[in-house]
Image (cartoon, grey):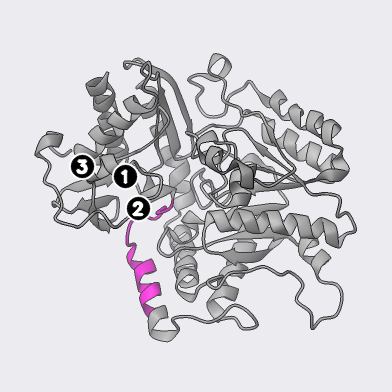
């Protein structure tokens, strides 16, 4: 573990920091003490001042095979030597077809049509548009409404923030929200679920709120329900046992599409290629991004059931069936990285490795239970979070200080509200997991 370094002694970068407006960042505070990385390798970043930082978050839940995996790097390099870009409208390159076929084989049975985007946010907006157009194609254009979930995160497009349920992401943009959106309650109940190991045994009944919303709005107006199987950005909120199965039953009963946002949970985060495999629940649409190519090149998309695709394939063949897409849909470099990443996951048996590491991470994280101000610990797969009691009048500041402490002393974690979350790469060693958790422990004690 790196020797502790006083934050006041950490060298500052010589970069001009003022031109960049950073996303989801306290820009003024950051630029007083910047955390700039210049290199990534395996499980580590290197900072501008030469320090090694153990990555406890897989970049941002995306570098599931670690940083700069040589096989993925080489695939991108070879693709650059062959084809840099091809327009996706009315032409397409071979790598996009190759990756789509691989994804179709990995997805749940029946989900075998892939529409590429460039990010998770775009993947969600794509899925919402597909859902609306699908019902219209079937003669049910009255189905315009979407049901999201409180605390849900579905990216930052206007569709995503409308169905999402994180107040800070929504409040400045309320006038432009999509109409006809309602929300299920979240499944985060500290009185009933605190310190659950894995999936809570209480809470499946919370899915029944969907029946109330169906009665309120009438099923004939509801196009789709969209949920994260495990809510990552809100702080690793784990679904109760039976909860997702109940949502599937209600959606099927009323002809409502079920969309799983697997931008975080896909490609090994929960020990399977998709969370739907872990939970035994098959949605109608899966959105993906991040881990599909281990974060190497921006890529996202939606995997849809064949019945949805077939509903569009009517009318004259010379007409466009779905008026949607992006200049960089299925970019050659991104797809080459995706093909290589899936091969790395398979060859290194990283899904099984994630399942093996899950109980190790669970034990380590729950060892923090008696630390100061800890009010909950949650875990599933290679994702875990510790929730701290907020300071009076200073919400999120305690967790922010733990985040700063961990980075200053050698590990990258994530904070949201007063929650510290981690999601290490599937290649992590047990000793690296121990190092990350011990730094969190020291951070919690240091800022108490």
Q: Is residue 209 magenta?
A: no
| Residue 230 in the image, given as x and y percentages of width and height | 56, 38
Q: Quadrant of the C terminus?
A: top left
19 or 54, nearer to the observer:
19
Q: Which of the two labelled residues, at mark 1 and mark 3, occupies the earlier sequence position?
A: 1
- Residue lying at the far right of the rendered structure: 139
Q: Which residues are magenta?
A: 62-78
Task: Tell me if 325 is positioned left or right of 221 in this view.
Answer: left
Tell me if I can see residue 33 in this picture.
no
Q: Which of the two labelled residues, at mark 2 and mark 1, occupies the earlier sequence position?
A: 2
Q: Is residue 75 magenta?
A: yes
24 or 192, nearer to the observer:
24
Q: Are marks 2 and 1 in contact (CB under 8 Å)?
A: yes
Label 2 – label 3 distance at C-alpha: 14 Å
Residue drawn where x is 62% and y is 43% of the image: 175
| Residue 417 in the image, given as x and y percentages of width and height | 43, 30
Q: Assign a secondary structure to mark 1.
A: helix
Residue topped by disc 3: 32
Q: Which mark is residue 21?
A: 2
Residue topped by disc 1: 27
Task: Tell me if 358 is positioned left or right of 265 in this view.
Answer: left
């Amino acid at each position: 573990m790196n020797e502790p370094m006083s934050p006041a002694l950490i060298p500052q970068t010589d970069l001009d920091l003022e031109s960049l407006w950073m996303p989801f960042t306290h820009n003024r505070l950051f630029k007083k003490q910047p955390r700039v990385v210049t290199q990534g390798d395996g499980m580590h970043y290197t900072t501008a001042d030469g320090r090694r930082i153990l990555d406890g978050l897989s970049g941002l839940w995306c570098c599931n095979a670690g940083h700069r995996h040589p096989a993925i790097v080489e695939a991108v390099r070879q693709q650059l030597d062959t084809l840099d870009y091809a327009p996706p409208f009315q032409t397409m390159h071979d790598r996009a077809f190759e990756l789509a076929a691989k994804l179709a084989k990995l997805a749940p049975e029946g989900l075998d049509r892939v529409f590429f985007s460039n990010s998770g946010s775009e993947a969600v907006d794509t899925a919402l548009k597909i859902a609306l157009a699908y019902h219209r194609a079937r003669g049910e254009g009255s189905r315009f409404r979407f049901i999201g979930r409180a605390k849900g995160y579905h990216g930052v497009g206007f569709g995503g923030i409308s169905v999402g349920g994180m107040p800070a992401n929504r409040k400045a943009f309320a006038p432009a929200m999509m109409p006809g959106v309602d929300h299920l309650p979240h499944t985060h109940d500290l009185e009933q679920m605190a310190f659950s190991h894995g999936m809570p045994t209480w809470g499946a009944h919370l899915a029944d709120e969907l029946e109330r919303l169906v009665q309120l709005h009438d099923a004939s107006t509801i196009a789709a329900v969209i949920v994260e199987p495990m809510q990552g950005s809100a702080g690793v909120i784990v679904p109760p046992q039976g909860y997702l199965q109940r949502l599937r039953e209600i959606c099927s009963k009323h002809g409502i599409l079920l969309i799983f946002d697997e931008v975080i949970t896909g490609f090994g985060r929960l020990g399977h290629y998709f969370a739907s495999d872990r939970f035994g629940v098959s949605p109608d649409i899966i959105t993906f991004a991040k881990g599909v190519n281990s974060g190497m090149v921006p890529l996202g998309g939606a995997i849809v059931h064949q019945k949805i695709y077939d509903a569009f394939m009517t009318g004259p063949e010379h007409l466009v069936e779905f008026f949607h897409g992006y200049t960089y849909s299925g970019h050659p470099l991104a797809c080459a990285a995706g093909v290589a990443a899936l091969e790395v996951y398979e060859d290194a048996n990283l899904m099984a490795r994630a399942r093996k590491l899950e109980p190790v991470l669970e034990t380590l994280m729950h060892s923090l239970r008696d630390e100061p101000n800890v009010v909950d610990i949650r875990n599933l797969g290679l994702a875990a979070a510790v929730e701290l009691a907020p300071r009076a009048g200073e919400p999120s500041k305690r967790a922010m200080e733990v985040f700063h402490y961990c980075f200053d002393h050698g590990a990258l974690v994530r904070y949201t509200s007063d929650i510290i979350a981690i999601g290490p790469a599937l290649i992590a060693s047990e000793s690296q997991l121990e190092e990350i958790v011990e730094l969190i422990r020291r951070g919690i004690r240091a800022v108490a």
